[in-house]
Amino acid sequence: MQLYVDSANLKDIKHATSLGFVSGVTTNPSLLAKEDPSLDIKELILDIHKSVGGHVSVEVVSTDTDGMLREADEILSWFPEATIKIPFIPAGLTAVAALSKQNIPTNVTLCFTAIQGLIAANAGATYVSIFLGRLDDIGTDGIQAIEDATEIWDVHQLDAQIIAASLRHPMHVLACAQAGAHIATVPYKVLMQCLNHPLTDKGLEAFLADAKKMQAQKG
Ligand code: E4P
């Protein structure tokens, strides 16, 4: 399972990607709205693209197909490798189908069921983002939606990649990997939580202390 960082914060993205295990970034309007309002969105996205050197999903904000396609053109004029993130609404599915005919990668966002994922895949989506944390938030089993999707994907050998999105904690990352999601897009904070283990720190401390002791004994 590949790991993306779900963020629009350049500092966090630069740090996460510098660690060598993150292969993409997903953004959304709410993540962008958290950043300094004086930042130019195009410049920020281009900086993100430069620091990732891999997948970057950029979301449209139009709710009609023509508007989405116009925005897609604009984003692609910024950098042609962009993946266009489109909400799972009927007008979005039409836009996905049109972009798919031009071999433009799309990421269908705001999917909450495997059926929505399946529909998006049939429309020609390259990626389908299934949100699990928001399902958990309303007392539903978010992981079940990912498991349902991976089961359907296995049976039908679908081409689209399943992105597990809206992750809240490291156990979500583990469960998505176990369920067979192709990608998990993980908030920076959760990625950092995944790096930490007290026994790693304790073990390193002991190794370093013993190495020092050995050097001191040698001379
Ligand atoms: C997916 O691509 C979205 O950006 C994201 O995972 C939304 O997660 P949230 O529920 O934490 O806002």
Image (spheres, rainbow, N blue to C red):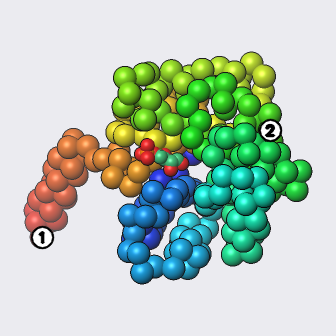
Choose between 24 and 33: the one closer to the eye.
33
Query: How many angstroms separate mark 2 from mark 1 (CA)?
Result: 70 Å
The total number of labels drawn is: 2
List x then y, in percent, for residue 72.
Answer: 73, 63
List x then y, in percent, for residue 184.
Answer: 52, 42
Secondary structure beneath disc 2? helix
Please give the name of the residue rendered at 88% of the width and 56% of the height, measured from the top-left corner. 102
Q: Which residue is mark 2?
A: 123
Quadrant that contains the N terminus: top right
Residue 32 vs 111, above or below: the answer is below
Describe residue 14's horizontal placement relative to residue 55 as left or right.
Answer: left
Label 2 CB less than 8 angstroms from ligand 1? no
Please give the name of the residue rendered at 41% of the width and 75% of the height, measured from the top-left corner. 37
Residue 47 sits in quarter: bottom right
Asked whether residue 30 is in view, the answer is yes
Please give the name of the residue rendered at 80% of the width and 38% of the height, measured from the top-left corner. 123
List x then y, in percent, for residue 10.
Answer: 44, 70
Residue 213 sits in quarter: bottom left
Label 2 packing within 10 angstroms: few (<14), some (14-19), many (20+):
some
Choose between 118 and 12: the one closer to the eye.
118
Please give the name of the residue rendered at 43% of the width and 35% of the height, measured from the top-left corner. 134
Label 1 CB less than 8 angstroms from ligand 1? no
Residue 66 sits in quarter: bottom right
Describe residue 173's horizontal placement relative to residue 181 as left or right.
Answer: left
Question: Which mark is in front, 2 or 1?
Answer: 2
Residue type at mark 1?
Gly
Residue 49 vs 149, above or below: the answer is below
Q: Which residue is mark 1?
A: 219
